[in-house]
Amino acid sequence: MLNTGWDVGMLVVIFMAIAIGYWLGRRASRKLDIEEPSHLEPHYIKGLNYLLNEQPDAAIDTFIDALEVNSETLETHLALGNLLRKRGEVGRAIKIHQNLLARPGLPDYHAQQVQLELARDYIKSGLLDRAETLLQEMVPVAAADIRTACLRHLIEIYRDEKEWLRAIEAVNQLAGRRFGRLPEEWRVAQGHFYCEVAEQAVQRGDYLAARRHLKAALNVDRGAIRANLLLGELELQQGSVRDAIRALKQVPQQNPDYIPQALPLLVQAYTQQGRQDSLKRYLLELQQGYQGTSVALALSDLLAVEEGGESATGYMAQRLNSRPSLPGLGHLLKYKAQQESGTASESLQLTLSLINKLNEAKPGYRCTKCGFSGHQLHWLCPSCKSWGTVKTIKGVEGE
């Protein structure tokens, strides 16, 4: 049995890759009318012998040492290194790439390709400092495509290390040689980087800097919902209620999927000003274009305060007939329990308790890209590392 986790199919793939590389090396030598090096065949036979004797590590090392490096065989080396890295053999992948860099006469572009793969090896193995240093050294001198790949990896490293200002700078460099706008992916990411910096500023009490960073987020990404949510919360805390309402009202226009996040702050802001009538008009206006449960719940709570439980009960019953939802049913039972007494009230309270437990047990948010689900909103999906793709779940059990 093989003791390195390699299966038969894997060995066949590697053997074929090396064989093709070996053949390409021989063909290149013939094209250039160069005498074929006599050391290749003995090494090749020796490596094959290791392979047949179930010693894949020794076989691979022998093949790598024997295989000539030129423009036609480089891809074979890189493919093998990439394959090893994906299989978790990162140390062996690093060895391949370091050996390639040690070969004399490697053209600049090919050397950059190898360095990029070596940086990816370091990232895979968790050696982020080494990867960062290597990538930073390559950015000023690398060819355009490799430079872009280096910056992308640097942004990912800065993201994981929460070096938000460096991430912003790297995104700016990504756009440096492109005279058009950044792709949406990077505009969205940079907007979130500014929001992260703003949250840090709020934590240290630097509200002026926080506002500046949030406005920068909106400048790079007009759809930066998170920036308006944070700005609304900040202005509310600072007593600038009108500014808070102005920021929060932008959220439904940016993306209605995030109305549930804006509503509690809007209700708080209008209530602080004693403008319940304005709040009611705004909620009714929202409900015309957005059928989510959160607006209906806010409206029913407002009706309960202004007109009493019966009015709220009637509204929620009508709402549930057209758009049934578990949270809506919970609200209806809450109002009914308040109106009843004795055994009827106790039964309703028990049912309400069960519904609340069901609501708490189920995930409330899901990533629209990878399907990750959880109980809280993540601006950066923990699974696929995408920004702004986690949203409130819709349907009978959710929004």
Image (tube, grey):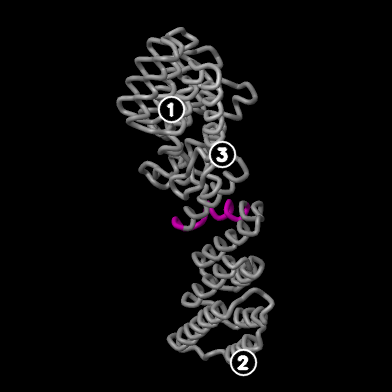
Q: Position of residue 282 (x, y in %)?
A: 36, 17
Q: Position of residue 334 (x, y in %)?
A: 50, 22
Disc 3 + disc 2, Cβ < 8 Å: no
Q: The residue under label 1 is which amino acid type? A: Ser
Bin the neighbour count of mark 2 within 10 Å (Cα to Cα): few under 14, some 14-19, many 20 and up.
Answer: few
- Asked if residue 134 lies in the magenta stretch, the reply is yes
Q: Earlier in the sequence, mark 1 or mark 2?
A: 2
Q: Position of residue 271 (x, y in %)?
A: 47, 12
Q: Is residue 394 or residue 356 the one in the foreground?
A: 356
Residues rendered magenta in the picture: 133-145
Q: The residue under label 2 is which amino acid type? A: Pro
Q: The residue under label 3 is which amino acid type? A: Ala
Residue at point 59% right, 59% down? 119
Q: Earlier in the sequence, mark 3 or mark 2?
A: 2
Answer whether residue 274 is visible to the viewer in this image: yes
Disc 3 + disc 1, Cβ < 8 Å: no
Q: Is residue 231 left or right of residue 307?
A: right
Above or below, 262 relative to 16: above
